[in-house]
Amino acid sequence: MLVSDAAAMTRTIDARGSYCPGPLMELIRAIREGSVGDVIVVYSSDNGSKLDIPKWVEKAGHRLIELAPRDGYDEIVVEKLR
Amino acid sequence: MKRVVIVGGGVGGTLVANLVSRKLARQIDTGTASVTVIDIAGEHVYQPGFMYIAMGHQKPGGLVRPERGLLDKRVRLEVGEVARVDEQAQLVELSDGTRLHYDELILASGSRVLPELIDGFAEEAHHFYGPEAAQRLRTALDTFVGGKVVIGIAGMPYKCPPAPLEVAFLIDSELRDRGLREKSELHFCSPIGRAFTIKSVSEMATPILAEKGIELHTFFNVETIDRERKLVRSLEGEELAYDLLILVPPHRGAQFLIDSNFAPAPGGWLPTDKHTLEVGGRANVHALGDATDLPLSKAGSTAHFEAPIVAERVAAAIEGRAPDVEKGSYTGKVMCFFEVGDGKGTLLQFDYDHPPKPPTPNRLWHLGKLAFNKAYWMTVPRGRV
């Protein structure tokens, strides 16, 4: 079982094949549309995402639950805190 | 009769129409093929000039010409607004009920700017993505006597990615020339973690921002405008006071693309193959320019370099042959000038595999951009470069 399976995921964004800043922008849209407590999973094959998304999550005051490499992509799990 | 229908008379639509009609000249002349451009106004607008209206270097009238005059005589022009595309029946329906059947459809419908998606934008913020808005910004700059200027991006993707940085650099130059720079603060807000999406361009631009004393705010995604307190707030929780607020408005693809199930809401960008430029796996539907979802600049230059690929693929389909392997595959080529102020510019040239390596800004590239703006009408839409 993936670590992220333990969290109650609200929304999954499959941004594989999308380039920076596409995955970050998709996450930002999901955060905007979501509610506090939502858990959002982003799949990204862009190497920039594993740097950009955690930095953005920290600045925006949300919580990075997990960043895990998968087969050819990264799985990034974020909880909306505010 | 094989029918090629092109939606949009911008850079991409006009150029691809001219290139396809040249390739199919014999078939058009003998009545076995036709090429039709549908344009909402029948006018061709040189959009890169809008920024120069705002910067006081361009009059609005010089940016518009009749579309008919730019099209090959073999191309038909239909002036009207597309309401929907019926994929099963292979027809495009206009809002006045006119129906145009197609065998090959080319979607060059561009992008829309929607300031109304941000509450308070119309009352408080300026932009330069249309002639009237650019003129209003010019007027605001003319009456500006110093204060806080905030330049930001209220949604991605947007047209001409370098433009907000260029505006920041050009306003800095203008304020220094007018003796107002000491009385002013300039803030540049980027939605991502650096000044520009492409790393190498960001590395070029960031020291210039610092040198000019323009404060960079990263991860600033515009959320609300507080009209009472003259504050712009970001989704990330930052707020900036402003005296002059300049924001890139949110952009969307054409509504009929969403309504016709060609593009997903809310963005309306067409899912486009990065090499073949086919839309959603449809062999007889191609897209170019702003309308696509490709990870490239939404810029006339992108459409310019995509058009020959679409023209080759569509002409090949009409002629019943396979497209040329090289001429029918887009490499992601884009080339555009980048103003940095003080009469200097640089050049961004890149493709999918080669990021730009902008040369040190100099006067030559600035003059190159000005020359290109004038030469555009005789070259790009007519397929001469």
Image (cartoon, grey):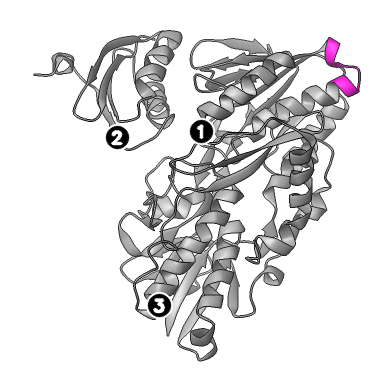
Q: Is residue B190 above or below residue B366?
A: above
The structure residue drawn at horizontal position 32% and vertical position 38%, both measured from the top left corner, is A17
Secondary structure beneath label 3: helix
User: Are circles 3 and 1 on residues that touch, CB within 8 Å?
Assistant: no
Q: Nearer the viewer, mark 3 or mark 1?
A: 3
The residue identified by callout 3 is: B318
Residue B234 screen position, x and y as percent: 54, 16
Query: Which badge, 3 or 1, comes first in the chain's sequence?
Result: 1
Chain letter for mark 3: B
In three-dimensional space, the C-alpha distance between marks 1 and 2, rounded to whole angstroms, equals 18 Å
Most foreground residue, B219 or B127? B219
| Residue B287: x %, y % from top left | 45, 57
Residue lying at 30% horizontally and 31% vertically, measured from the top left: A45
Is the same chain shared between marks 2 and 3?
no
Instruction: Find numbered disc 1 in the image and state the secondary structure of the residue it sits on.
Output: loop
Residue at mark 1: B156
> According to the image, label 2 marks what residue?
A16
Mark 1 vs mark 2: give the one in front: 2
Marks 2 and 3: CB-CB under 8 Å? Answer: no
Is residue B201 one of those drawn in magenta?
A: no
Specify whether disc 1 shares its chain with disc 2: no
- The three-letter code of the residue at mark 3 reads Ile
Instruction: Point out the stretch of residues depicted in magenta.
Output: B176-182
**Marks 2/3: CA distance?**
34 Å
- Same-subunit check for callouts 3 and 1: yes
